[in-house]
Amino acid sequence: MNIPIPLIAKLTFATSLILLVFMGVLDNINLKNFRKVMIGYAVSNAEEIGDVIGQSTYDAMMKNDKSSLNSMIGRIAASENIEYIRLIDQKGRVAFSSKAGEVGSMVGIYAHRCTRCHSSAETGTTPPLAHNSRILVSKAGKESLGFTRAIRNEPACSSAACHFHPVEDTVLGHLDISISLEMLRKKSHEYRLEFVMLTCLLLLIIGILVTILTHYLVDIPVQKLVRHTVQVATGNLDSRVTVTSRDELGALSEAINRMTENLGTADRELKEWAESLEQKVEERSQAVMRMEEQLRRSEKLASLGTLSAGVAHEINNPLTGILLYASILGSDKRLDPALLPDLDKIISETKRCAGIVKDLLEFSRESLPAKEQIAITSLLDEVATLFHHHPDFSSIVITKQYDENIPLVSVDPNQIRQVFMNLVINAGHAMPHGGNLDISTEQSSDRQSIFISFKDTGTGIAEENLTRIFDPFFTTKAEGTGLGLAISYGIIANNGGKINVQSEVGKGTTFIISLPVICF
């Protein structure tokens, strides 16, 4: 069984381990620095002793007073940390020593404390004539500081009457001092012990502080996040984490809140989708039906176009003959004037049939649009200006609302003008007693197409007729042919656009044309 380890315990352990390693390294560095300082202090002390003894040796040699020199060196050697002091002449014989029994003994050049200088002499290098210090370790493991200083043949000394050393002898002997480093070892041990105790105290204090801070800054926020995730896992998507800081954990809490909110939104959308699935299926079915209706309409338009072309060609010639002979007959003086009204009726109805035939020919003719890049608003202004002065539009107010940033479109301007005029005429027929016609343009949200709207306040179109108004020969007007909207539908489709209608009886009708924009 795996026992979970709390996060605060892991952080406390890791922090303590890092601090322990850091304190250990710092302890070694401090101990080395302390030892270096203490050895430097011992060397400085040995130098001072060497200076005193050197000056005393010079004075004694000038006075030839060896007894006072030996007495003074003996008193200095009686210090607690000094192991011994001795004077060694040029030949390596001990002339004086604070240690009993060493006077008169010889110090070989290969002695441990002498090899540093004499090894240089054997290799041909110049040995140092000044004082020299080194760390010596006895067989028992005790450390001591060995200090050696040359006793030089000063000019005042070599010229004295009692002096028997020649001037060429630059070094008359050496002063050898040994200082015990046992006190240094004890001080180092005490220093390390104090440092370790201080380190343990600091570790304890830092550990407590880190634990407290980790608990409030990390553990509590993490526990809140854990409880929140448990709530979300059980399906409570309304749960939120209280954000109490602006650090990374606060940012994480806000991100989790946003994630939970998105999950809640998605869950509600799924439920709404499930609840409205039948409605969506019905809407999709109606969309499929509209597509099928458009397909049937296209097929019907194709068939009617072929039929209309044939019928128009067959009827056009007889109608032309009727109109011609009726016109000739009307100018014949032999005609009874009482028959002129009937003859005018024949001529007007024949012209009407000729117009129908013309519409049939135009409906059946699938001419390719001659597209140009135009500003659709200029075309709308042209059509609106044309109808401003039309007698049938004297009581109709035409208003224009254009998008100033509307882009250019690529269409056949003559065909599109015909569609606009047809829609304006239909709006005028729907408002026989006057009204408002609003012409507006706007750009789609994806900026790929534009919309042109013709909104009137006329009688409107019944709902059952909305699906048939683009069918050829369907009309609700007594004298209409039912080809105007069918032709407009075909023109818009050939120019790459779509036309839709929205209407409500008694409130008016809106035709919306969408055309693709030019992409640069």
Image (cartoon, grey):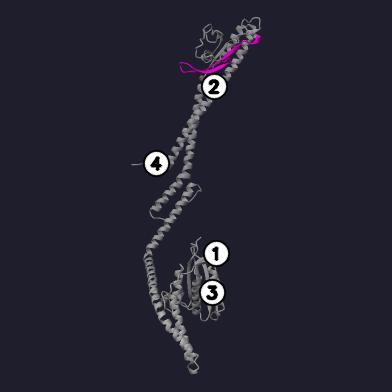
Residue placed at 47% from the left, 38% from the top? 208
Residue placed at 40% from the left, 81% from the top? 314
Q: Amino acid at mark 3?
A: Val
Q: Which residue is mark 3?
A: 383
Front: mark 2 or 3? 3
Residue placed at 48% from the left, 89% from the top? 328
Q: Is residue 480 at least partly visible in the picture?
A: no
Q: Is residue 310 magenta?
A: no
Report the quarter where the N terminus lies. Answer: top left
Determine whether the residue tagged by mark 3 lies in a helix, strand or loop: helix
State the count of labels.
Answer: 4
372 horizontally vs 71: left or right: left
Q: Which residue is mark 1?
A: 405
Front: mark 1 or 3? 3
How busy is the neighbourhood of tag 4: few (under 14 within 10 Å), some, or many (20 plus)? few
Task: Check contact, mark 2 vs mark 3: CB within 8 A.
Answer: no
Residue 193, percent from left and from top? 49, 27
In the image, residue 12 above or below residue 348: above
Task: Check contact, mark 4 vs mark 3: CB within 8 A.
Answer: no
Determine whether the residue tagged by mark 2 lies in a helix, strand or loop: helix
Q: Residue 277's image quarter?
A: bottom left
Residue 60, percent from left and from top? 63, 8
Q: Is residue 155 magenta?
A: yes
How busy is the neighbourhood of tag 3: few (under 14 within 10 Å), some, or many (20 plus)? some
Measure the alpha-carbon separation of dots 4 and 3: 82 Å
Q: Which residue is mark 4?
A: 5
Task: Give the residues drawn in magenta, as a range.
Answer: 127-156
Front: mark 2 or 1? 1
In the image, residue 397 above or below residue 226: below
Q: Which residue is mark 2?
A: 39
Q: Is residue 91 at least partly visible in the picture?
A: yes
